[in-house]
Amino acid sequence: MEKYQGTNWFAEIQSDFPFPFNLVPPDISWQLATWFELIGAAALVLATRFFSVSLAVLTLVAWAAVHAGHGYNVCDNGYKLPLMYLLMLLPLIFSGAGRASVDQLLWYRSGRH
C-alpha cells in the first residue's frame, strides 16, 4: 500500500536493481511492483506456483535493491521481512497450494492429470 499511495522513489535506487531489472525505466518498475504486490498476492489463490515464483523474484529484487545494505532488523529497513516472505513462498513454489486449492481444481478439470 505504501507504493500505491506514495510517490515513486525507484529512480533513486535504479542503479541498485540487479540486471536486467536495472534496464527497466523507474516509472514502469514502480507500476509493475505496485500492482504485482497488490494483485499477485490475491492471485496466489488462482495460480499458486506461478505467482509464488513471480513474487519471489520481486522479493529478491527488492532485497538486493532496497534491503541488503541495511542489516537484518525490520525497523532499519533490513532484510528480515523479505527473508520471511521468501521462506513463506518456498513451500508454495515447491508443493503448490494443495488439494483444496483453486489451481488444483482447474488442473483436474482440464483433464491433464
Image (tube, rainbow, N blue to C red):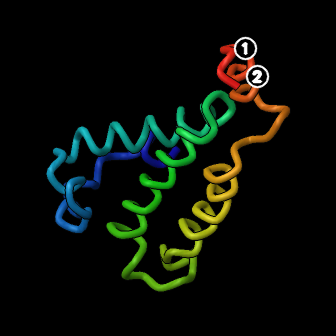
Looking at the image, which residue is at 48% across and 73% down? 77
Q: Which residue is mark 2?
A: 105
Q: Secondary structure at mark 2?
A: helix
Looking at the image, which residue is at 79% across and 40% down? 98
Tell me: 32 left or right of 74: left
Farthest right residue in view? 100
Q: Secondary structure at mark 1?
A: helix
103 or 14, which is in the foreground? 103
Disc 1 residue type?
Arg
Question: Disc 1 to disc 2, how far (Cα)?
Answer: 6 Å
Q: Is residue 47 above or below residue 85?
A: above
Tell me: 66 left or right of 22: right
48 or 73, which is in the foreground? 48
Q: Is residue 48 above or below residue 74?
A: above
- What is the crowding at mark 1: few (fewer than 14 residues within 10 Å), some, or many (at least 20)? few
Residue 3, x across and y down, in percent? 43, 46
Residue 51, x across and y down, in percent? 54, 40
Residue 14, x across and y down, in percent? 20, 59
Looking at the image, which residue is at 63% across and 55% down? 89
User: Which numbered dot is residue 109?
Assistant: 1
Q: Is residue 14 above or below residue 36?
A: below
